[in-house]
Image: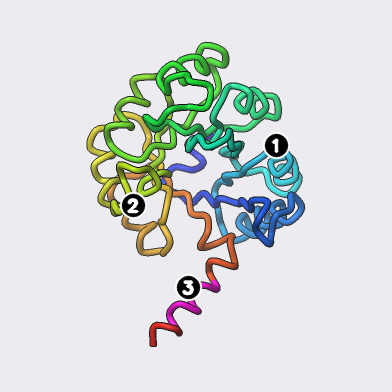
Amino acid sequence: MMNNINGKLVVSCQALEDEPLHSSFIMGRMARAAAQGGAAGIRANSVADIREIKKEVSLPLIGIIKKNYGECPVFITPTMKEVDELVEEGVDIIAVDATKRERPDGVSTEEFIRNIKKKYPSQLIMGDISCAEEAVMAEKAGVDIVGSTLVGYTENTKGNIPLEELDKILRVADIPVIAEGNIDTPKKVKKALDMGAYSVVVGSIITRPQLITKKFVDAIEER
């Protein structure tokens, strides 16, 4: 399965409850459109969306469940409960927040990853990290892949440039590194792959029309 996405594009098909395209049916069609455009894989949020996407495409799936636990900043597959749900549904890769931030259940990230691998030793786990230090930590804990998903989204990486941080991550990681997060142009996708990224995940600039529209409107207002 990993070979299927090596050097290729994965499209993130997600729409949260407060977004206009929030619908498992729509995300399924979005995945079909991505497949027709040549995407090699799909990243999806929630069991409902994953089930619908499976009806539309047979591409490798990176599955997550976004769940808010109070004010905790960790919300991408934050606890074993969400991992269990994704394993039961069946996805090729489960992505989890692998930052150093405090988790909602108080378990350290390292222990969380070790617990997943102990319970599901054959399940591929992707650690969504925000910096090179976290990449090293996640790899030592047992993830199979790291993704630069959260660069710029954590307190310690605000303002960091995604491709610059990706370069640092690539220098320290001995496992596949997937570039993700603000990779919003074909030029950046090519650059990430040229740098050595295993694959690239692109989301909002393909699948969130309200944000795409805003880019054009902002350009007009800057005139």
- Which residue is pictured at 28% across the width and 49% down the height? 195
Q: Which residues are magenta?
A: 213-220
Q: Taking 168 as reference, is 106 left or right? A: right
Q: Earlier in the sequence, mark 3 or mark 1?
A: 1
Q: Closer to the camera, 221 or 11?
A: 221
Q: Residue furthest bottom?
A: 223
Asked whether the residues under the numbered discs 3 and 2 touch, taking CB atoms below 8 Å apart as contact, a structural biologist would say: no
- Residue type beneath disc 3: Lys
Q: Is residue 218 magenta?
A: yes
- Residue type beneath disc 1: Val
Name the spot of residue 84 as percent of width and height, x first. 64, 22
Q: Which residue is mark 1?
A: 47
- Which residue is pictured at 35% across the width and 40% down the height? 130
- When asked about the image quadrant of residue 120, the answer is top right
Question: For residue 215, which numbered disc appears in the image?
Answer: 3
- Which residue is pictured at 47% across the width and 18% down the height? 107
Predominant SS of the magenta segment: helix
Asked whether the residues under the numbered discs 1 and 2 touch, taking CB atoms below 8 Å apart as contact, a structural biologist would say: no
- Which residue is pictured at 41% across the width and 56% down the height? 182
Q: Earlier in the sequence, mark 3 or mark 2?
A: 2
Question: For residue 192, which numbered disc appears in the image?
Answer: 2
Looking at the rendered image, the quarter that the C terminus falls into is bottom left
- Residue type beneath disc 2: Ala
At numbered mark 3, what does the secondary structure look like: helix, strand or loop?
helix
How far apart are the alpha carbons under marks 1 and 2?
Answer: 30 Å
